[in-house]
Image: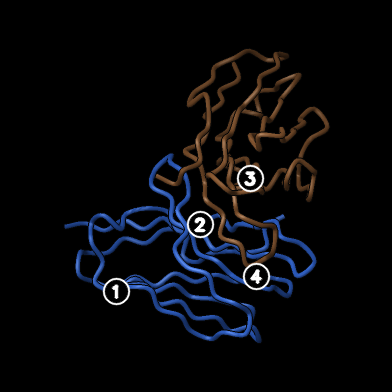
Amino acid sequence: DSGVTQTPKHLITATGQRVTLRCSPRSGDLSVYWYQQSLDQGLQFLIQYYNGEERAKGNILERFSAQQFPDLHSELNLSSLELGDSALYFCASSLGTGPQETQYFGPGTRLLVL
Amino acid sequence: SQQGEEDPQALSIQEGENATMNCSYKTSINNLQWYRQNSGRGLVHLILIRSNEREKHSGRLRVTLDTSKKSSSLLITASRAADTASYFCATDRQAGTALIFGKGTTLSVSS
């Protein structure tokens, strides 16, 4: 158990809908990262927050947004969902934000868009 | 785009044999990390090797890094059925902290 929790575990929704994925980092960790894993694209970095502020941005679509709250939990909002958004979404956390940080991954949220 | 590319894509071995996976990357890095993912589950950090290190050990794991060739290898000795998983290398760009993952090597260890 990494100490990172993600809810929900599974999500089934329809195209055009909006969903919110939630992540609670390990106790004491200030950085939260979001990744998308799909069969064709592999594991893609989406976005990173550090202590409430956006720190780095990857291949995140404009339809997707995220935020980190004062209690350090984070939410990833996916809107106008398309079939291709079906994937595993992982959250990871680390203590700081340097390149030497080990990232601890949550169990993921499996999103299926029908 | 992928920074790291693992090779082979899939590897099947018998228990007790050694498994070697390779990773190549394109740009200069600060560190290279290896992660394991059991089917459909979260990734588990295995080992981090810094750009100024050449070799690192952790239990049955041995990682090498050759920055001149931009490549790394992960050796698992005396494999067990429980080692069956996908293994990913992850690199960072020197200018940033986000990890960039390869597509992984799927290892299957049969008893």
Asked if the residue at tag 2 contacts the one at tag 3, i.e. Cβ–Cβ closer than 8 Å, the answer is no
Which residue type carries mark 1? Thr
Q: Which chain wears blue? A: B
Q: Nearer the viewer, residue B23 or A18?
A: A18
Name the kind of residue labelled 2 in the image: Gly
Q: Nearer the viewer, mark 4 or mark 1?
A: 1
How much space separates mark 2 and mark 1, taking CA atoms? 19 Å
The residue shown at (74%, 21%) is: A79
Residue B77's disc is 1
C-alpha gap between disc 4 and disc 1? 24 Å
Three-letter amino acid code at disc 3?
Answer: Gln
Q: Which residue is mark 4?
A: B25
- Residue that mark 3 sits on: A41
Secondary structure of the residue carrying numbered label 4: strand
Residue B30 occupies which quadrant of the picture?
bottom right
Task: Report which colour depicts chain A.
Answer: brown
Q: Which comes before the other along the chain, label 2 or label 1?
A: 1
Q: Residues within 10 Å of mark 2 (few under 14, many from 20)?
A: many
The residue lying toward the viewer, choosing from A94 and B105, is A94
